[in-house]
Amino acid sequence: MKKIVIKTTAITLAILVVLVALVYGALALFAPLTLAKLYDGAGNYKLATVYYERQYEKTGDTADLYTLCLKLDEYSDGERAVTYLELLTDDDSASFNDFCTSVDGENFTGRISTKEYLYGKLVKAVCVSKGVTYAVELADELTSAEYTDYNPFYVLIIDRVINLDTTELSFVKTTIEAKLSYLSGTALTNAQNDLQIIAEKLS
């Protein structure tokens, strides 16, 4: 009798293991977002981002790409963050601008816009994975059309994790100063504010 109970229990457990494996496999294949949210809630960054990545690969949807970009850590996962942030920002395309506007909403009153946040995150990821020179060159490019309050230069120079040294800050300073001749209005004020922050850090 005892052997029958043990055998029945073992069979039941085996069936449960197979069922769990099948359900997990089905979710991974057909509903990776469900697993992404599950692991995200459990604080498992590695598996969460794997399934957020699979969700985007499955749908190709901009909203899923945006979620992946938000979840990727620009400091510990810089190269992967750069890959997907570059896909999303897409050289300041009209579709990217429209997407950011839709995320912010018509009555946006926040301090930093979606576009500013993503540009800043991209520049930080580039700095971590490729170096300060590439990050500053990218920031220069991204501020060629508009120089906002929370522009990539500002995000880079105030970041406490990256913590630019005096040589790097001087490089940023020179790059910003080269833009002053063609900036005006609010853009010029923002650039001058950034230069003031650098001056205080260098003093």
Image (cartoon, rainbow, N blue to C red):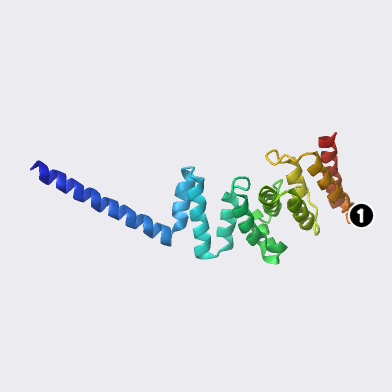
Residue found farthest to the left = 1
Which residue does the image show at 49% across and 47% down from the upper left?
Answer: 40
Asked whether residue 144 is in view, the answer is yes
**Location of residue 92 with respect to 132 vertically, above or below:** below
Category of crowding for the residue at label 1, using alpha-carbon neighbours closer than 10 angstroms: few (below 14), some (14–19), many (at least 20) = few
Q: Quadrant of residue 27?
A: bottom left
119 vs 189, nearest the viewer:
119
Relative to residue 15, is residue 147 drawn left or right? right
Which residue does the image show at 57% across and 50% down from the upper left?
Answer: 71
Q: Where residue 141 appears, x then y in whole percent?
A: 78, 58
Q: Where residue 185 appears, x then y in whole percent?
A: 88, 52
Relative to residue 156, is residue 22 drawn left or right? left
Which residue does the image show at 70% across and 66% down from the upper left?
Answer: 94
Q: Quadrant of residue 87?
A: bottom right
Which amino acid type corresponds to the residue marked 1 in the rendered image? Ser
User: Which corner quadrant holds the N terminus?
Assistant: top left
Relative to residue 59, is residue 169 drawn left or right? right
Q: Which residue is mark 1?
A: 181
164 vs 5, nearest the viewer:
164
Q: Where residue 79 appears, x then y in whole percent?
A: 62, 53
Residue found farthest to the right = 181
User: Which corner quadrant holds the C terminus?
Assistant: top right
Which residue does the image show at 74% across and 53% down from the upper left?
Answer: 134
Helix, strand or loop status at disc 1: helix
Asked whether residue 151 is in view, the answer is no
